[in-house]
């Protein structure tokens, strides 16, 4: 009986701790700055990028780690399809950031360079997090890990913020957000 009571108390306490955890993502909120300082594939006139550089555009922001199997199995294929559909669209910005929160030496800027080459990415790719300092972008966007996708509307409001979105759903949402005018509304 005492053991069962101890187990019930432990479960209740873990539930209380879990309830205090902040919700993942920032759905419906203004997109915060990225704070990313290391970049690959930047336009010639830029030495860094942030959300303010894309005012008035729909933004597809993809967070990954080089060693993340889910990133390679799901996230990058979706990213490649989004690039194929919207890569040349002046109303859409597509950006990827390696959001290191573990395995810092394996998820460093050199790993990001190899990832760019592996997937033939011609989009800006940033590096956030290094040497035991977890990604500031992850903290600002309250991501739950990787792969993590954020879709931001023309007004800077986060309209999708979660582990995965399939390519069809991403294309549909981006198309819908491109067509919106005026103030945004959360889904």
Image (cartoon, rainbow, N blue to C red):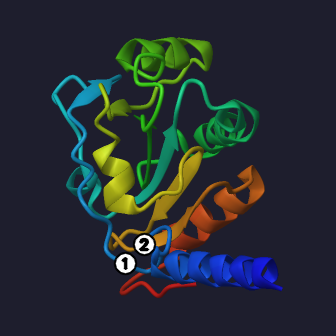
In the displayed structure, would residue 76 be above or below residue 140?
above
Secondary structure of residue under mark 1: loop
In the displayed structure, would residue 125 be above or below residue 90?
above
Q: Going 61% across and 80% down the picture, which residue do you hit?
A: 15
- The quadrant of the rendering that contains the N terminus is bottom right
**Is disc 1 in contact with disc 2, using a CB cutoff of under 8 Å?**
yes
Secondary structure of residue under mark 2: loop
Q: CA distance from mark 1 to mark 2?
A: 6 Å
Label number found at residue 107: none
Q: Quadrant of residue 181?
A: bottom left
Q: Indicate left or right for 134 with 176 as reference.
A: left
Name the residue tied to disc 1: 29
In the displayed structure, would residue 142 be above or below residue 90?
below
Q: Estimate the x, y position of residue 108 in percent, counting from the top left.
A: 39, 20
Can the viewer see residue 90? yes
Label number found at residue 26: 2
């Amino acid at each position: 009986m005492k053991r069962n009571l101890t187990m019930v108390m432990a479960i209740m306490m873990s539930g209380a701790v879990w309830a205090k955890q902040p919700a993942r993502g920032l759905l419906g909120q203004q997109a915060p700055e990225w704070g990313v300082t290391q970049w690959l594939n930047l336009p010639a006139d830029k030495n860094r990028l942030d959300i303010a550089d894309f005012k008035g555009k729909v933004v597809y922001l993809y967070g990954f780690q080089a060693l993340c199997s889910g990133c390679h199995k799901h996230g990058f294929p979706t990213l490649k399809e989004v690039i194929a559909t919207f890569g040349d669209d002046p109303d859409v910005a597509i950006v990827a950031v390696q959001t290191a929160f573990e395995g810092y030496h394996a998820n460093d800027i050199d790993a990001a360079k190899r990832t760019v080459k592996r997937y033939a990415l011609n989009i800006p790719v940033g590096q956030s997090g290094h040497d035991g300092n977890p990604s500031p972008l992850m903290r600002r966007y309250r991501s739950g890990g990787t792969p993590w996708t954020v879709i931001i509307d023309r007004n800077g409001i986060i309209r999708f913020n979660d582990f995965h979105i399939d390519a069809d759903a991403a294309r549909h949402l981006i198309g819908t957000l491109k067509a919106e005018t005026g103030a945004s509304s959360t889904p």
